[in-house]
Image (cartoon, grey):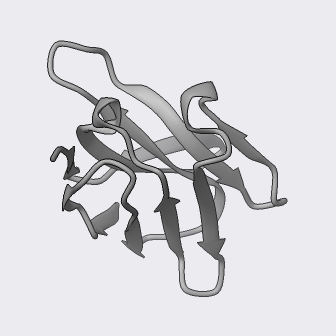
Amino acid sequence: QVQLVESGGGLVQPGGSLTLSCAASGSIFIINTMGWYRQAPGKQRELVALRTNTGYTNYADSVKGRFTVSRDNAKNTAHLQMNSLKPEDTAVYYCNLEQRQEGRTVGYWGQGTQVTVSS
């Protein structure tokens, strides 16, 4: 099992910045991707940003140019730098990790951290 612990959420005014962090521990093998998803009330969970172990990144169109995902492979951590935050960024943000184990790809989720953008 892999445990993911997120931190860094909170309340921020529109135009402000926050950095989310995710620390992975437990039975870690070869991590393919670490990334962030979010779920707003009444909406489906959606991809925000992810980074593979080769450095490939993928961002939702709504956050391109404002958010940056990074990883520290040695420490098994991932970060999401969020700038120019908008009220529509308000959601619970979840860390996601996918790794190869026992011949298949297995995904894990963190417990989520609330981000609220409001004046």
Q: Residue furthest bottom?
A: 74
In terms of depth relative to the viewer, which is nearer, 28 or 64?
64
Quick check: 22 left or right of 56? Answer: left
Image position of 91 with respect to 6: above or below: above
Rendered-image quadrant of the N terminus: bottom left
Which corner quadrant of the image does residue 69 belong to? bottom right
Residue, x 63% and y 66% (percent of image)?
Answer: 70
Residue 110 visible in the snapshot: yes
Residue 101 visible in the snapshot: no
Residue, x 55% and y 28% (percent of image)?
Answer: 62
In terms of depth relative to the viewer, which is nearer, 108 or 50?
50
Which corner quadrant of the image does residue 74 belong to? bottom right
Image position of 21 with respect to 59: above or below: below
Give residue 54's position: percent from left, percent from top: 84, 59
Give residue 99's position: percent from left, percent from top: 59, 53
Give residue 12's position: percent from left, percent from top: 23, 58
Quick check: 34 left or right of 116? Answer: right
Image position of 16 with respect to 73: above or below: above
Give residue 27's position: percent from left, percent from top: 44, 70
In terms of depth relative to the viewer, which is nearer, 28 or 40?
40
Which corner quadrant of the image does residue 89 belong to? top left
Residue, x 68% and y 53% (percent of image)?
Answer: 51
Quick check: 37 left or right of 11? Answer: right
Q: How many marks?
A: 0
Residue, x 81% and y 50% (percent of image)?
Answer: 56
Quick check: 85 left or right of 78? Answer: left
